[in-house]
Amino acid sequence: MLHISHKQQTHTHMKRKINSLLIVLFLFTSCTTLVKAQTSTKPDPCKDSMLLVLKSKPLDSLSQRQFQYLQDKEKECENASQLESIQAQQSSTTSTLWWIIGVCLVASILIIVL
């Protein structure tokens, strides 16, 4: 009969707990990556080909329709830039929050394991 010492059992038990911790950590980081990947990507109105062409022309050479398009797209571009800035700040805050939660989770598991 194979006899396993208490020290070996404790070592094996510790390895299992560490492996479990690594799996939880992997799943956590995978989830945060998936959340980031799900953000929608819309075409950038600032890179609209017609807008870029119209911006390169003198204003007095534009028709009223072209001028209106230029104004509308520039407003769209400004709004998109402001929205992008707000979303970047929110994303940064969310990422920080997820990492704080993750660190607390890992610390809690380590306290339980050790």
Image (cartoon, helix red, strand yellow):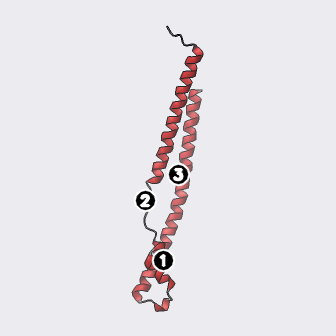
Residue at image location 46% in from the left, 50% down from the top: 35
Image quadrant where residue 11 sits: top right
Q: Position of residue 15 (x, y in %)?
A: 55, 26
- Position of 66 with respect to 87 (left or right) is left
Q: CA distance from mark 1 to mark 3?
A: 30 Å
Q: Residue furthest top?
A: 1
Residue most extreme to the front: 1
On screen, residue 81 above or below 62 = above
Say which amino acid is labelled 3. Thr
Q: From the top left corner, tell me how far across and down residue 69 is, in percent.
A: 42, 81
Residue 52's x, y, as percent? 48, 79
Residue identifier under label 1: 74
Residue displayed at 57% across by 49% down: 96
Vertical arrangement, residue 89 with respect to residue 65, above or below: above
Locate the C terminus by quadrant.
top right
Judged by depth in the image, the label closer to the viewer, 3 or 2, is: 2
Nearest to the observer: residue 22 or residue 97:
22
Amino acid on which disc 1 is placed: Glu
Upstream in the sequence, badge 1 or badge 2?
A: 2
Assess disc 3: are there few (<14), some (14-19) or many (≥20) residues with their C-alpha within 10 Å of its C-alpha: some
**Disc 2 residue type?**
Ser
Q: CA distance from mark 1 to mark 2?
A: 21 Å
Q: Which residue is mark 3?
A: 94
User: In terms of sequence position, does the residue under pointer 1 or pointer 3 come before the other?
Assistant: 1
- The crowd level at tag 2 (other Cα within 10 Å; few <14, some 14-19, many 20+) is few
Instruction: From the top left corner, tell me how far across and down residue 104 is, in percent.
Output: 57, 39
Dot 3: element: helix
Residue under numbered circle 2: 40
- Mark 3 and mark 2 lie on one chain; the one further toward the N terminus is 2
